[in-house]
Image (cartoon, rainbow, N blue to C red):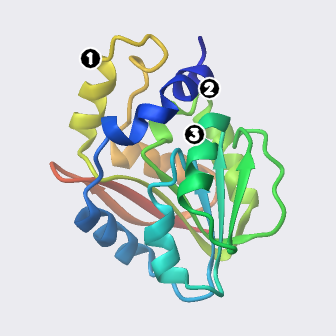
Amino acid sequence: MGCREFFNSLAEKWDDMCTHDAEKISRILDMAELKEGDKVLDVGTGTGVMIPFLQERVGARGLITAVDVAENMLKIAQRKNGAPNVAFIHADITTADLEGSFDLIICYSVFPHFKDRQQAIKNMYRFLKPGGRMLICHSQSRKEINELHMNSASKEINRDHLPPAAVVGEYLKEHGMKVLAEVDNEEMFVVMAQR
């Protein structure tokens, strides 16, 4: 079973298995400085956890494109978040060819699962507007994320680790981005860069 099949198999139970701290998510999104009308690419949307938080900030004039490799996760995200300004795309971000360009690309609770991180960043960079921001984040600490994956009985994710923020920042710099924020503490993990 690959990563896609793993997440597909857990899609119906996912929201019961995972909790997300709304206050921390709000603090992370404050860093992104989203404005009404912004276009956002939500990479690895899963069951659409970030969509209501993003909608609140971009408003009805904004656009959210939610992408996930696991079609069962995407179906749940669609069921929960059926607003007209949200588009759902079943795709692998390392090979996706998306229409338009975005003010913000967010990778919330997904970066450890990218098998080819450099290719994922390279491809996402193509979809960023000049001055647009890429946000790689978790509302848990890197230590918590890595322990959760390492202790998983599932071989599909037990080697999926989150590198230190400085390392992720270097990945983004290698693709010509300017790192604006690195937070890697006991509360959360955030790396934000600008094209």
* Amino acid type shown at disc 1: Asn
Residue 1 position in % (x across, y down): 59, 11
Which SS class for mark 1?
A: loop
In the image, which disc is placed on residue 151?
Answer: 1
Residue at screen point 52% across, 87% down: 35
Say which of marks 3 and 2 sits in front.
3
Q: Is disc 1 in contact with disc 2, using a CB cutoff of under 8 Å?
A: no
Residue 41, quarter of the rendered image: bottom right
Q: CA distance from mark 3 to mark 2?
A: 10 Å
Q: How many marks?
A: 3
Residue 67 position in % (x across, y down): 66, 50
Say which of marks 1 and 3 sits in front.
3
Q: Looking at the rendering, in which quadrant would you find the C terminus?
A: bottom right
Residue 12 drawn above or below residue 102: above
Q: In the picture provided, is 4 more to the left or to the right than 108?
A: right
- The residue beneath circle 2 is 4
Which SS class for mark 3?
A: helix
Residue at screen point 38% across, 17% down: 158
Q: Residues within 10 Å of mark 3 (few under 14, many from 20)?
A: many
Of 175 and 101, nearer the camera is 101
Residue 5 drawn above or below residue 67: above
Q: Earlier in the sequence, mark 1 or mark 2?
A: 2
